[in-house]
Image (tube, rainbow, N blue to C red):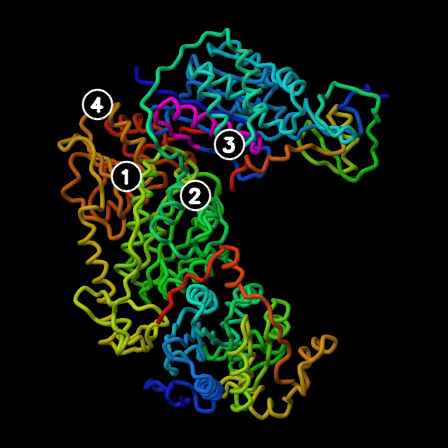
Amino acid sequence: MKVDLSLAIGGFQGGGIESAGQIALRAFVLKGYEVFGSREFHSNIIGAHSYYHIRVGGKALRLPLDALIALDAESIFTHLQSLSKEALLICDQYSLTTKASEIPSMSKALKRRIEQNYGDLSLNKILTDQELKIVALPMRDLLKELSHERSMISVSKALNVMGISAGLYLLGLNKETIKKAIEGQFSNPGINLKAMEIAIEKVKDLERKELPDGKKEDKLILSGNEAVAMAKISSGLDFLSFYPITPATDETLFIEKSGKIITVQAEDEISAIGMALGASLAGLRASTSTSGPGFSLMNEMVSFAVQAEIPIVITLWMRSSPSTGIATRTSQQDLLHAIFSGHGDTPKVVIASGDHSEAIEDTARAFELAEKFQIPVIHLLDKFIASAITTVDKNAFRTLPKRDFSENSDGYLRYKITEDGISPFLPIGRATMIVSSLEHDEYGSATEDPVDREKMILKRIKKLEKASEVLSEESYSVYGDHEPEITIVSFGSTKNAIMEAIEELKIPIKFVQLRILSPFPDLSKELVGKVLVIESNAGQLSFLLKVHCRVDGTAKKLNARPIYVDEVVKAIKAFMNGEKEVIMSEGV
Amino acid sequence: MKERKCANCNNWSPHNLYSFVGYCYEKKKLSFSEYFCELFIELELEEEFYWCGTCRSIIESEEVKEHISKRHRISRRAFMDPDYREEIYEG
Amino acid sequence: MKGFDYKTDAWIQWCPGCGNYGILTALRNAIAEVEIDPKKLVIVSGIGCSSRIVYYIRGSNVHTIHGRAIPVASGIKLANPDLMVIVAGGDGDLLGIGAGHFVALGRRNIDLKVLIHDNAVYGLTKGQAGPTLPSAVKLRAMNYPNSHEALNPLLLAFASGYTFIARAFAYHVKPLKDLIKEVLMHRGSAVIDILQPCVTYNDLMTRDWFEKRIYYLDSLPNESELLQKMKEVDRIPLGVFYKIEKETFDQKINSIMGRKNKGVRNV
């Protein structure tokens, strides 16, 4: 029996959703299942609705939900329409008397939609007509029972454990597995285990089906931020400078915490990249991480890094833009921004990763390319990957050798003209030289001479041509059928949803997943049949593909939510029925 | 005179997210909104700011009357879990 | 070594009479007297007339972009604390577009020596008002009198936390050289505000104008007179205003990380 579940745990931001989600993930991993957990939350410190969407038995998100564990009324209202017909709903008995209009943290827009659909009724009334399996726990009474047994101070971490324990138990996990997951979550789990006991006792007589054991593997459970941080550490990162920004900061703080790497919080993103470039010039392996707004500030430095030929890896965690947009939600809106960043002719490499494993692989590759070609490499990721948690192979991480500085320092020329355009690199402090943002001669002295200028610009372009040759085989992955009716082209975090959609549709579809977006690979031989681009922006990859090749239709995700398998299935069907533009609108 | 229970007591603050439970600053422990004890003191309206549990928001003293007239749950402050920071996402 | 040994073969592009010549000579001679290995001498500049200095002194130098010399220099120094890292730039570069970095450097106390080539105008772009130009002054290339107040670099440096703050005059080459030598020996964020005329665009603050106003401090001002001395405008005091020893940023970072510097060394 293949276990395939989609569940959500919802509640207040700051109200224990994170630990409940992690307990659930850990429990399913202990049971031996593939898991993928996505965290959705408001840009708010405390009190707004946040939730954990967990897929068991796959690496992409699916809707509708088979189960919802709602720690408050807002969670039920928010996810009501995402529930399958007979979904399991675990909630607080007392929240069922609530009307949407009574919830201060709920957005006006959602209140309006709920009123249009159901009227301003309490949940009790709205839910009467539904076929859901509702388990309404008397949370207040359960909490009283717990407080009689133990003196307790963290309310949220008692209620969330009760909710999640009851939920996991009814979904078919045994008490022992749930217990282990809770023990793994808290350093002092006594009271939490008691909360679990009380909750399971309350639901133990309800109908449930025990889940079979899956395949147990010894894997790491990581967020995308953590995966990239660990990959940077493993790659031998020496220096990281950053300015706090969502959703990049968790990566940098993880690296800072390791205590092995010089980590500097700069005064702004200009300084963050400037310091990293300085450290790189001095011979260290250096990087900075940011998101769209911060990368905007870094633009002039990207151009400087190209001109002065300084290796640098910029990890760009895309979020919902333009401007501040929706800071805690996902998108792929910085593709063109990354490719065309920096004023002037600025050859650079842009890499995009489709999931956690690829992000780990690409982190090491980004350093190799940056240092080999002495260029900026922009590693494109997004908030969806940043905060999603999944399992990763323990030996996915690569180590890289130290940077090579074997060139003789006598008569050293920083910008020596060579056949492949690559001049041997010596760090500042090893030879006299000038590293320059002005157009320069081979030594680095400023020049406005037309012949020197032409030579230097061609040298920099030649490096990218060389990179293009090296990368040609690895610029994209091809999945699915090789004689298809349609070819889907995409990049980044849409990958797993598309793969699963193709599997489900059982029609010949080819999927070209771009890994390198600059230099843009030659796809002319790969595009067979009608071409559908799928992306989480208003058509940026479509634009590139039109310039380089051809496109017949685009499926876009614009609502700042992650992409779901089911909406991809629908989009492909719509495209096959002749629709040129499909908007995918799933997610809450 | 208000009913003598924690929810109406000057010593008690409801949890910011779950209003049925709260913290007693006299007894230094959690209790539930409908409990009562010998230390009950009626809410004194002398502060500059209050917590409205119905609106889940801090309100100013000038707004208190209006909230009370709408039967909102007013208390001196809100109680937050000591470890709530562990559950918050960057953003 | 002599100052001459640090000369490069680049043709110097500054206008005849420019204060930058005085600074160049003083800096070269100071470096020579301290005997810094040219490979370990790192001058980092931004953009502007003065930032061209990286081409005129033999070192392992970096010409960055407008306003951003301090971040790049900070990265270099943190990566390799063995290097002597000097930041050179104009008042527009360091106190206008780069003011945020100037303040942050003071807060960090990274061992960088900042030389402000302070002529109160944007020379390369032909004479717009710089951050240190007094209010209501109309220089020859300006359309209207200056509507901004002048920034006081010494007060800003003091408020930011610089551990060495001095002022000099570009044409007094020998005292300037001695001051630069002193600053090279200091450990921490240091700044010298070097007053210089712009012969082409600043027709108010000429060499003569400065020479009528400047005088040298007898000694390091004490706490009660420090701010008063920094604020003086009718007469302009020169010399060291403030100097203290404090733990530097790289020392702090390394003690937090519980390890020695791991920069690239053993040149």
Q: Earlier in the sequence, mark 2 or mark 3?
A: 3
In the image, which residues are magenta?
A13-38
Q: Secondary structure at mark 1?
A: strand
Distance of label 2 from label 4 (alpha carbons): 33 Å
> What label does residue A319 carry, if any?
2
Residue A323 visible at all? no
Residue contact between numbered discs 4 and 1, judged by CB atoms under 8 Å? no
Q: Are marks 1 and 2 on the same chain?
A: yes
Residue pointed to by mark 3: A18
Residue pointed to by mark 4: A506
Q: Earlier in the sequence, mark 3 or mark 1?
A: 3
Q: Earlier in the sequence, mark 4 or mark 1?
A: 1
Vertical comparison of C247 with A120: above or below = below
Image location of residue C60, percent across then percent down: 37, 75
State which mark lies toward you, 3 or 1: 3
Q: Chain of mark 1?
A: A
State which mark lies toward you, 2 or 3: 3
Residue contact between numbered discs 3 and 1, judged by CB atoms under 8 Å? no
Q: Secondary structure at mark 2?
A: loop
Amino acid type indicated by mark 2: Arg
Tell me if mark 4 has few (under 14), some (14-19) or many (20+) residues whose alpha carbon lies within 10 angstroms of its own: few
